[in-house]
Image: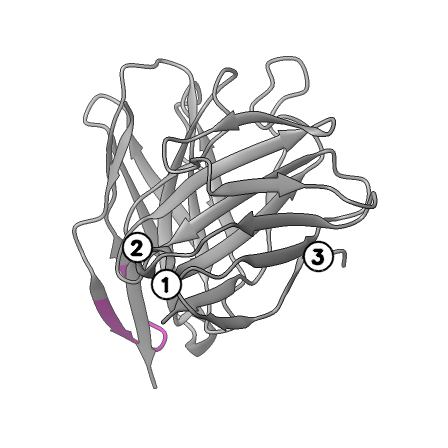
């Protein structure tokens, strides 16, 4: 069964360093997403990406964050200068189409297993 | 803004028994979807069940069923004949039909199924 894969499973980085979290979405999917979950908190939407550009982002997704689809298979989240409060689980997801599209009906988003980012 | 609240941080149940996880939400939208996601120790988020708000009939997937009360904005998950493999975090989530692409999640309920 196709699945979304994320690497690494755990990343430890020093405050101020740049990190890149990697995701390989399901191959025929067109929409990609990043979510994060700070320990003990809600899973929060960060950004969605379609057709090589950001289609929606939350207020959390400020200038220190960026996303990219560098080679047609990977989807990356870069955090430019990490802060202690960036420590969280980061989940990538992908879907075949826009979920809840009135014409296409609902299409499921598939999640990866997450990357635990620890900023020290 | 939409919010999702799960008031039970942790629950436990004996194997083969039934357990109900609670979820309430707040929205001014009339068309939306509600979900329960399961996150086992492997950490993969897995869709358990989905409910379209326009459907009055409660969704069912094998041992999993929901009690959707639209007027009360309540969406509980019932797990029947609980199995050890049901041990996981369960997240209730909300998605507006059309418009925003984001899922809005609750904080989750940690369910432990005891042998």
Q: Is residue B50 left or right of residue B110?
A: right
Q: Quadrant of the N terminus of chain A?
A: bottom right
In the rendering, at what x and y percent does residue A49 appear? 63, 32
Would residue B71 be visible to someone looking at this image? yes
Q: Which residue is mark 2?
A: B108
In the rendering, at what x and y percent does residue B115 appear? 34, 86
Q: Are marks 3 and 2 in contact (CB under 8 Å)?
A: no
Would residue B62 be visible to someone looking at this image? no
Q: Which residue is mark 3?
A: A3
User: What residue lies at 43% left-to-right and 69% top-to-bottom?
Assistant: A14
Q: Are marks 2 and 1 in contact (CB under 8 Å)?
A: yes
The residues colored magenta run B11-19
User: What residue lies at 61% left-to-right and 41% top-to-bottom?
Assistant: A67
Q: Are marks 1 and 3 in contact (CB under 8 Å)?
A: no
Q: Which residue is mark 1?
A: B89
**Against B38, is B43 above or below?**
below
Q: Give the chain letter at badge 2.
A: B
In the picture, the disc for residue B72 is none
Q: Nearer the viewer, residue A13 or B80?
A: A13
Task: Name the secondary structure under disc 2.
Answer: loop
Residues at marks 2 and 1, CA–CA distance in whole angstroms: 6 Å
Q: Give the chain letter at badge 1.
A: B
Task: Name the secondary structure under disc 1.
Answer: strand
Mark nearer the N terminus (2 vs 1): 1
**Against A96, is B17 above or below?**
below
């Amino acid at each position: 069964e196709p699945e979304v894969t994320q690497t690494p499973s755990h990343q430890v980085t020093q405050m101020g360093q740049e990190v890149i979290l990697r995701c390989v979405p399901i191959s025929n999917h067109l929409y990609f997403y990043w979510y994060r979950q700070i320990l003990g908190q809600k899973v929060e939407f960060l950004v969605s990406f379609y057709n090589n550009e950001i289609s929606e982002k939350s207020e959390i997704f400020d200038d220190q964050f960026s996303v990219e689809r560098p080679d047609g298979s990977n989807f990356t989240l870069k955090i430019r200068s990490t802060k202690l409060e960036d420590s969280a689980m980061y989940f990538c997801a992908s879907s075949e189409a826009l979920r809840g599209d009135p014409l296409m009906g609902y299409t499921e988003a598939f999640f990866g297993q997450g990357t635990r980012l620890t900023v020290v | 803004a939409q919010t999702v609240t799960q008031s039970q941080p942790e629950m436990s149940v004996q194997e083969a028994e039934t357990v109900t996880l609670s979820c309430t939400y707040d929205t001014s939208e009339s068309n939306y979807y509600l979900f329960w996601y399961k996150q086992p120790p492997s950490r993969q988020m897995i869709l358990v069940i989905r409910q379209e708000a326009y459907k009055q009939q409660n969704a069912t997937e094998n041992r999993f069923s929901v009690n959707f009360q639209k007027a009360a904005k309540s969406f509980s998950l019932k797990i029947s004949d609980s199995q050890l493999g049901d041990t996981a975090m369960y997240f209730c989530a909300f998605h507006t039909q059309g418009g925003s692409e984001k899922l809005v999640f609750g904080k989750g309920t940690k369910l432990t199924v005891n042998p």
